[in-house]
Amino acid sequence: AVVPVSAGRRYAWCACGHSKKQPFCDGAHKASAPDISPLRFTPDKDQTVLLCACKQTKNAPYCDGTPIVQNCLYNTCYHSYHVQYL
């Protein structure tokens, strides 16, 4: 998911996949995946970033293009899209 982030603001990236506010956490993991916690991060500058929505990245919370068949713009990932924007 391509999202703007603000410097110094703390974000919670959904790591469980159950959030209705992807790619951010809405607390759904507490009931659906209690062993999985969100990844909290604070950007050091204002920017637009590509956050992983499929949860397969090795560079959380950022998309690394791991999946090849889906599209991150719609909460999962297209490899061709990632290659252009990584």
Image (tube, rainbow, N blue to C red):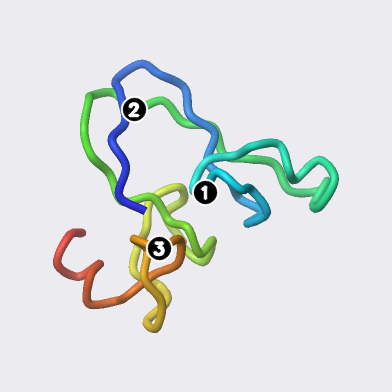
Specify whether 42 is left or right of 46.
right
Residue at 49% x, 48% y is 23
Q: Mark 3 highlights which residue?
A: 74
Q: Please state the total of marks drawn on the protein image.
A: 3
Q: Nearer the viewer, mark 1 or mark 2?
A: 1
Task: Determine which of the numbered discs, if any, sits on residue 22 in the image.
Answer: 1
Residue at 62% x, 40% y is 38
**Image location (x, y in percent) of residue 71:** 36, 71
83 over 46 or under it: above or below: below
Cα distance between the residues tagged 1 and 2: 18 Å
Cα distance between the residues tagged 1 and 3: 9 Å
Element on which disc 2 rests: loop
Callout 1 touching callout 3 (CB < 8 Å): no
In the current view of this chain or complex, which residue is farthest to the left? 84
Residue type beneath disc 3: Tyr
Task: Determine which of the numbered discs, if any, sits on residue 43 in the image.
Answer: 2
Front residue of 23 and 56: 23
Element on which disc 3 rests: helix
